[in-house]
Structure formats: structure tokens, C-alpha cells
Image (cartoon, helix red, strand yellow):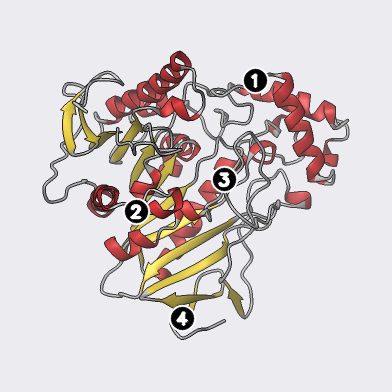
Amino acid sequence: MEGKFMKYIVIETKSGKLRGFEKDNVRTWKGIPYALPPIGKLRYKAPKPVEPWQGIKDALEFGNVCFQRGRFPIVYNNINESEDCLYLNITSSTSLVEKKPVVVWIHGGAFLNGAGSLPAYDGEKFVVNGDIVFVSINYRLGPLGFLKLSSFGHGFEDNLGLLDQVAALRWVKENIEFFGGNPENITVMGESAGAISIAYLLATTDINKLFSKAILQSGILEERLTESEAFDITVNLLKKLNINEDNIEKLETIPVENIIQAADEIGKELQEGIDRHIFYPFTNSKLRKEPKKAIEEGMAKGIPILIGTNRDEGWLFTKDKAQAERITESFWKDSAQLAKSQSKFAPVFKYRFDYTVTDHYFASKAVHGLEIPFVFNNLKVFQIESEKNRLLADKIQKLWISFIRYGTPQIEGVKWPEYEASNYLTAIFDNEIKVLSISEPYASSNK
């Protein structure tokens, strides 16, 4: 309901008119459909463009999130889980002075859970502090997004979660100008599975033309599935559902809860571990090259990237020191390799997040995901509000804003030079921000 400090805003996109709201000089549109609902005969098909609508569509509430599974359920209250989940959200300012830089956030969650609407991913501070147009998206997850089904015909596709992301980016490219954004200055930004997704998007030239810069936070590529492994997992799941190539069309009508249950059973049988997943992107005829190789060959030439990891990534997943360090080293190794490869073809800026909060339930080590509240300048969600933490969050977010705007993360008092294979220059985020030449994941930051 329109209140004293809120008014409705209606804009017209290529899909139709959308009603959002304006409050405190920030404009917000939630739950915008960027593709048709992937249900029924569209369940395992590539996303279809949303059909233009008549009249005004309300964009006042978040859309459904994709069905979730896995050991790490999303931290969210009153979620609506549904197959009908292909929605995005846009936040912008009331300023109309210029076309604004755009950032599209691709959430993490091991390709099993998460949503663009999580409170931790509230992009309002990007709008207020940087006049950035902030976009967050949902995409299909788990057995709805990452089965290997194209081999069975019937129009089924593979890597549907990634194809959803591409569809969202196309919608943004075609419509973001109506929200004050510059379609020629779009940055994709993601963490964990979101960063892995971006590596795959970078690896395909007809896709990476949809954006101009990329931010990859704590992505790991070592655990990728081969196409053959993905096929075997899919066949196993189909057997549990009593489906084969002769009755493959049953996949369109079988209750989604049955699919989720079968996926959980397979995970247990294969002893799905903390550093390997059975639902994961894989190379195929559309995603033709494994990201590491594609980027090394210059497939993402001319696209600046900001990339990094956290000092204690692995401690989120295990308290076993040897195992935690092995996982951390994997994150580091992959980010270093991508940074080295891309530095031959575009500016690269590498970081390591070392900062910790003493005696905190989550932040006492620089674990996987801890940089997120600092990047989003949203400390309250993680219960780490303090003046010291706020000052660091202000600086980190300003560096991200600078990169989103100009392709270089520079603010007063912080000089962050480009990473090159010969210099290993890495920004260290700790009690102070400094740049060191480090080639190992645990190289001292003089903490």
C-alpha cells in the first residue's frame, strides 16, 4: 500500500508496463518475469522469452524462489518455493542525469539453493552510494537446472540454470535503459556458484557480449562434472522415477517433489561431499569449452575482471584443519589461474579477504562468504555492525563501485594495481587495505 514516504512508479518495458515503488529516492521493482514459467511442457526446456502483457503488472513483491535442496538451506523466512521462479529484481535511483552503470548479481548456493531476493543481497547501498542500477536474478537449481537431458531428445536441454542466467542477461540488455541503466556498461557479479557461473559465461563469446566486466568472488572450478558423469547421474535419477527414453515425456508431468526426493537419494548413494556436487555445469555443444581453457585461449578478451578469495574459505565447510586448508587452496588456485590467464587479454584485479571479527559465530575466520556483507555494505544481516567494520565495508564497496563504473577499483587512499603473472599483486582486505605480491594462499599479510 502506498504510504507517506512511498509512491508507485510505472515504467514501460519491451515486455509491458511495470509498477514499482519509490522510497527515499530509491526506486525498486521486484519479481519481474524475464522468461515464461518453466513448468509443464517447459519444465526441462530452455527458457522462453516472456510474452508481452496488457495493462500494468505489479512488481512490488519478490517472485518465487526455485525449489531448494542440499545441506545448506537458504537463510530466509516465508519463502515461496516453486518451479515458477524465473524472476529478477531491479533497484535504481531517481536521478536521471545519465545512463547509469549496471551490475547483475548471480547468487551462490552450490547450484542447490539460494535466491536473488535474500536479505544479504539487498543492493540498495550500491544505488545510494554509487548511483548503480542493481539487478538480482533467480535461476533453476539442483535437478531442475543441471541434468543432462539433451541426449534423450524431446526438446530437452542441458545446463538450464546457466541458460536461465543468459536469458536474464538478455532481458536486462534489452530493457535496462527503461530503468535508467546503460546497456553498454553491464557488470556481472557473483559469489561461489555465482562466480563459477560467470566463468562459464566468460567462456562463450556469443554470451560474454551481454556484459562488459565481471566480478568473481570465491569461485572454484576443480569440481566440475564431465558430460559423461552428468549423463550417468541423470540416468540414475530417471531410473528412480521409472522413466526411460521410451517414456521420457513423463518428466513434464511427474510431481516436482518426486524429482527432488530422487535427487536427494542419489546424493546420499554417491556420498555427495563438501567439495563435489552432482548438479553442476558441464561443457556441451552450447558451452563448448571448459572455462579455464577457454579463458586461457582468450575467449574473454577485452573483459576486465575483479577476482579473489577469502583467506579461510574451507573453514565454513569443515572444522578439520587439513581438509579446510585443502579446500581453501583449491579456491585460491582456481582464482589465481583465471587471473593469470585473463591478465594477458584484459585488466585483472585480484584480492584476498583476510578480515575477521573476534569471537563471532560466523566471522571469527575469513570463511567462504564473509566478504559478502562488506561488498554489499550490509553488515546488519550478519550481525557484525560496528564502526570499524562499517569503515572497511565503505571502502570495499566503493572499490567495487569504482570497478563497476570504470573498470578500475580505485578510491582515495587505496591504490590497487593490475594483477599480472609476473607480479602477483593482490589487494589484501584486513585491518587495513594493502597490496602485496603473493603467490601462495596463506602468504603473510602481517596480520
Indicate which disc, 4 or 2, sits on the residue closer to the N terminus: 4
Which residue does the numbered mark 1 point to in the structure image?
A: 229
Give the foreground label among 1 and 3. 3
Q: Position of residue 343 (x, y in %)?
A: 25, 30
In the foreground, 326 or 391: 391
Q: Residue at x 50, y 71 (%)?
A: 13
In the foreground, 442 or 302: 442
Residue 114, which numbered label? Answer: 3
Q: Quadrant of the C terminus?
A: top left
Residue 377, which numbered label? Answer: 2
Indicate which disc, 1 or 2, sits on the residue closer to the N terminus: 1
Residue 446 occupies quadrant: top left
Q: Amino acid at mark 4?
A: Met
Q: Amino acid at mark 3?
A: Gly
Which residue does the numbered mark 4 point to in the structure image?
A: 6
Q: Secondary structure at mark 2?
A: loop
Cβ atoms under marks 1 and 2 closer than 8 Å: no
Q: What is the spatial separation of the Cα atoms under label 3 and label 4, in whole angstroms?
A: 29 Å
Other residues around mark 3 within 10 Å, as few (<14) / some (14–19) / many (≥20)? many
Q: Residue at x 34, y 53 (%)?
A: 377
Give the foreground label among 4 and 1. 4
Q: What is the spatial separation of the Cα atoms under label 1 and label 2, in whole angstroms?
A: 40 Å
Q: Amino acid at mark 2?
A: Asn
Other residues around mark 4 within 10 Å, as few (<14) / some (14–19) / many (≥20)? some
Q: What is the spatial separation of the Cα atoms under label 4 and label 1, in whole angstroms?
A: 52 Å
Q: Residue furthest top?
A: 322
Q: Secondary structure at mark 3?
A: loop
Give the foreground label among 1 and 2. 2
Indicate which disc, 2 or 3, sits on the residue closer to the N terminus: 3
Image: 354 above or below 126: above
In the foreground, 77 or 97: 77
